[in-house]
Image (cartoon, helix red, strand yellow):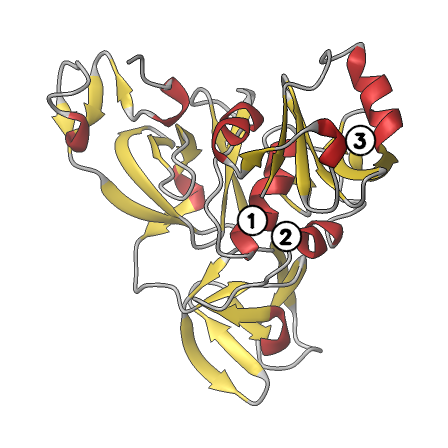
Amino acid sequence: MRSDARTTAARPDLAARWLEGTVPAARYVDPQPMVCARAVASIRGAPADGAEQHDQLLFGELFQALEMAGDWAWGQAPRDGYVGWVRMGDLASKGPAPTHQIAAALAHAYAEPDVRAPASGPFVLGSLLTEEAREGRFVKAAGAGWFVQEALSPIGRFATDPVAVAERLAGAPYLWGGRSSLGVDCSGLIQQALYACGRACPRDSDQQAKVLGRPIPAAAFGRGDLVFWKGHVALGLSPERVLHANSAAMAVSVDTLADALARNRSVYGEPVAWRRL
């Protein structure tokens, strides 16, 4: 079976050690575990700032670096499996396991446990934090600063409604390869909503259409269901309305299903799948 290059940590000259014997390469290397040290960092298709953004790392997410080339690292993001290039300045050595994740759409980190202190960020939904200290309602996260605890959720405690999570990103700007309220694409919106609920989710819409939920007839579509086109996905808010990140609105917007179907027909054709989570 042909492997998916998006999620296979292999090139003709280099591959991850765990692929030895299954994927041909000139040499195999062990990864260097690193973590994202920025609020959001790009995973690009080539080691250049002008290269296409394929995906993103959020603060605290793991990156398995397989090659360092100047200012760039090539490797794989285990959370969704995507392979690509990340700026070395956006990465740090892996430390202790995360203890919390950001549960708010956006949250600032403060230099001191005081909302009047200088703030950095904003940090985004799903970012992973490691608690270093606690003072009152503030939690100090390694490498970031002090967060108000109401914006956080302990690792292992998840939201229960992906639709409610996705609705919190309504109005977020559209960004190819984005997966946060600072900028998100159609499949990134679905991925973030499911991650917040403790559910696995591939990165791209074609991958999602194969594995998420179960097929349903179009007539059964409703709240929490997904409709896929070749290159796009939308989330049902009701039988008549959908929420999706789209380049027509350049934002996460609410549209009638009828309008979405009509507009997408000229761009993506007819839907290829209707699925229930």
Against 102, is 110 above or below?
below
Q: Is residue 185 visible?
A: no
Give me the disc on residue 162: 2
Tell whether 162 sits left or right of 265.
Answer: left
Marks 2 and 1 close (CB-CB < 8 Å):
yes
Label whose residue precedes the other's in the sequence (3 or 1): 1
Q: Position of residue 250 (x, y in %)?
A: 80, 31
Q: CA distance from mark 2 to mark 3?
A: 22 Å
Q: Position of residue 59 (x, y in %)?
A: 49, 53
Residue type at mark 3 is: Met
The residue singled out by tag 1 in the image is 194
At x 48%, y 35%, the residue is 202
Q: Position of residue 14 (x, y in %)?
A: 21, 20
Tell whether 97 sits left or right of 267.
Answer: left
For label 2, count other residues whose C-alpha is less than 10 Å away and answer few (under 14), some (14-19) or many (20+): many
Quadrant in the picture for the C terminus: top right
Q: Is residue 63 visible?
A: yes
Residue type at mark 1 is: Leu
Find residue 63 and report its image quarter.
top left
Marks 2 and 3 close (CB-CB < 8 Å):
no
Against 238, is 28 above or below?
above
Question: Dot 2 lies on which element?
Answer: helix
Q: CA distance from mark 2 to mark 1?
A: 6 Å
Residue type at mark 2 is: Pro
Against 110, is 271 above or below?
above
Quadrant in the picture for the N terminus: top left
Q: Nearer the viewer, residue 265 or 152?
A: 265
Question: Dot 1 lies on which element?
Answer: helix
For label 1, count other residues whose C-alpha is less than 10 Å away and answer few (under 14), some (14-19) or many (20+): many
Give me the disc on residue 250: 3
